[in-house]
Image (tube, helix red, strand yellow):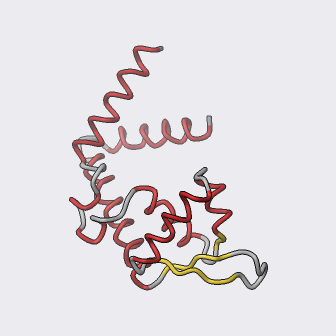
């Protein structure tokens, strides 16, 4: 089993490098200065508008000080804005700006391109098998 884990890990890294997933800026200039963790936060805010910072910190397991620095950077870049919560005066909600919505849309577009490129060598049946295996891994 250890040998299989090592081989799968190595293949995963090779695939990531081949697809240049480590540098989204190669796929889109609009994503060139945005880190993976920032893209994750942008996606969370998109999926749940007005999410509070504390909830984001719980979901991505990032210390509060680190999260504050990341949000500061996103706010400075005009991607998110902080809004006092109407439900809890102590909480700060986050909202995507129009630029933030564009970044999210661009990231979704690039994700689909990467997935298409990754699946290109596979037949339809192999893609269906891969989906089943990935679902099994996710559920396990």
Please give the name of the residue rendered at 28% of the width and 39% of the height, measured from the top-left corner. 15
Instruction: Where is residue 37? Give x, y as percent.
Output: 46, 56
Q: Is residue 103 above or below residue 126?
A: below
Left or right of 37 in this view: 137? right
Judging depth in this view, the residue of 1 and 34 nearest the camera is 34
Please give the name of the residue rendered at 43% of the width and 37% of the height, measured from the top-left corner. 129
Left or right of 89 in this view: 95? left
Judging depth in this view, the residue of 115 and 90 nearest the camera is 90
Quarter holding the C terminus is: top right
Instruction: Where is residue 5? Give x, y as percent.
Output: 43, 22
Please give the name of the residue rendered at 51% of the width and 69% of the height, measured from the top-left corner. 71
Instruction: Where is residue 100? Give x, y as percent.
Output: 43, 77
Left or right of 128 in this view: 92? right
Q: Report which quarter residue 87 is drawn in.
A: bottom right
Judging depth in this view, the residue of 21 and 120 nearest the camera is 21
Instruction: Where is residue 51? Give x, y as percent.
Output: 64, 72
Please give the name of the residue rendered at 24% of the width and 47% of the height, measured from the top-left corner. 19
Q: How many marks?
A: 0
Q: Report which quarter residue 108 is drawn in.
A: bottom left
Judging depth in this view, the residue of 129 and 100 nearest the camera is 100
Left or right of 30 in this view: 3? right
Q: Is residue 45 above or below residue 55?
A: below
């Amino acid at each position: 089993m250890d040998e299989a884990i090592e081989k799968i890990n190595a293949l995963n890294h090779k695939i990531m490098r081949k697809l240049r997933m480590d540098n989204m800026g190669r796929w889109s200039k609009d994503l060139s200065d945005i880190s993976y963790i920032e893209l994750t936060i942008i996606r969370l805010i998109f999926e749940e508008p007005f999410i509070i910072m504390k909830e984001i910190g719980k979901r991505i397991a990032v210390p509060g000080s680190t999260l504050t620095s990341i949000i500061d950077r996103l706010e400075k870049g005009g991607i998110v804005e902080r809004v006092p919560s109407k439900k809890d005066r102590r909480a700060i909600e986050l909202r995507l700006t129009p630029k933030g919505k564009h970044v999210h849309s661009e990231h979704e577009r690039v994700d689909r391109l990467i997935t298409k490129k990754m699946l290109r060598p596979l037949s339809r049946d192999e893609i269906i098998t891969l989906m089943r295996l990935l679902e099994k891994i996710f559920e396990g």
